[in-house]
Image (spheres, rainbow, N blue to C red):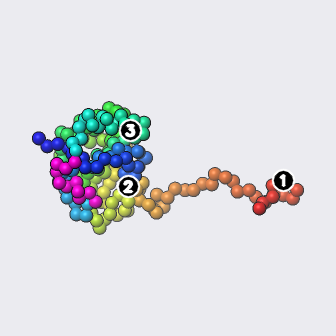
Amino acid sequence: METLNFTREQIVWQEVPGEVSLAFLFSGCPLRCKGCHSADSWKGGLGSELTAEYLQSRLERYRGLISCVLFMGGEWLPEKLLPLLAQVREAGLNTCLYTGLEQDELERTSIAIIPQLTYLKTGRWKMELGGLDSPHTNQRFIDLRSGEVLNHLFVKDTPAARPKIIPLVHTPQPAAEGALFQPA
């Protein structure tokens, strides 16, 4: 019987906008995208099994500090991933899945997973198109509650991504003659 093993566990801030996420990178990815930054995850059986007990211990340890759990892969073993997603949702946290599959591929192969997700990143890594931080990427980051594609939150140095800066302090005008305040 196959197990869902993770090779990395970390707290991340950038992978899910607006969330502090506990992220697990699973081994055994069958997609093997050329140029993948996580090629060490291709070989199955590496790392430690993510059991319900271990996940619960991490949820308790980070209670009040995290708002989301990010699963990087694992969709190839939906019968193992589904109970973990449900466990995270029961703990009142958001869930995210990073997959190289397209959304329709995931829906065909692992339809039960979709309702357990808050966010979904889809699309194979294509070096020439870049990742979520590229305006030319084929990947999509979707808020499944609204269906909104949130790629613009990853792209830097675009007018849509740049916040408008509003000064919090009013710049004083030169004081009138005899006033207490004199500009420097």
Q: Nearer the viewer, residue 45 or 170?
A: 45
Q: Which of 107 and 156 is in front in this view?
A: 156
Q: Nearer the viewer, mark 1 or mark 3?
A: 3
Write the start and end of the magenta stretch as one range: 37-47
Q: Where is residue 102 in the image (x, y as percent from the top left)?
A: 24, 53
Q: Where is residue 116 in the image (x, y as percent from the top left)?
A: 28, 38
- Distance from label 3 to label 2 (Cα)? 27 Å
| Marker count (numbered) | 3
**Amino acid on which disc 2 is placed:** Asn
* Residue to which mark 3 is pinned: 62
Quadrant showing the N terminus? top left
The overriding secondary structure of the stretch rendered in magenta is: loop
Instruction: Tell me what residue is drawn at x 21 percent, y 42 percent.
Output: 49
Decide: few, some or many residues near mark 1? Use Cα within 10 Å; few <14, some 14-19, many ≥20: few
**Amino acid on which disc 1 is placed:** Leu
* Residue to which mark 1 is pinned: 180
Of callouts 3 and 2, which one flags the residue occurring earlier in the amino acid sequence? 3
Q: Nearer the viewer, mark 2 or mark 1?
A: 1
Position of 178 relative to 11 (above/below): below
Of callouts 1 and 3, which one flags the residue occurring earlier in the amino acid sequence? 3
Quadrant showing the C terminus? bottom right
**Amino acid on which disc 3 is placed:** Tyr
- Distance from label 2 to label 1 (Cα)? 52 Å
Callout 3 secondary element? loop
* Residue to which mark 2 is pinned: 151
Q: Position of residue 63 (x, y in %)?
A: 39, 35
Q: Among all residues in the image, which is located at the extreme top?
A: 90
144 displayed left or right of 46: right
Position of 179 relative to 71 (above/below): below
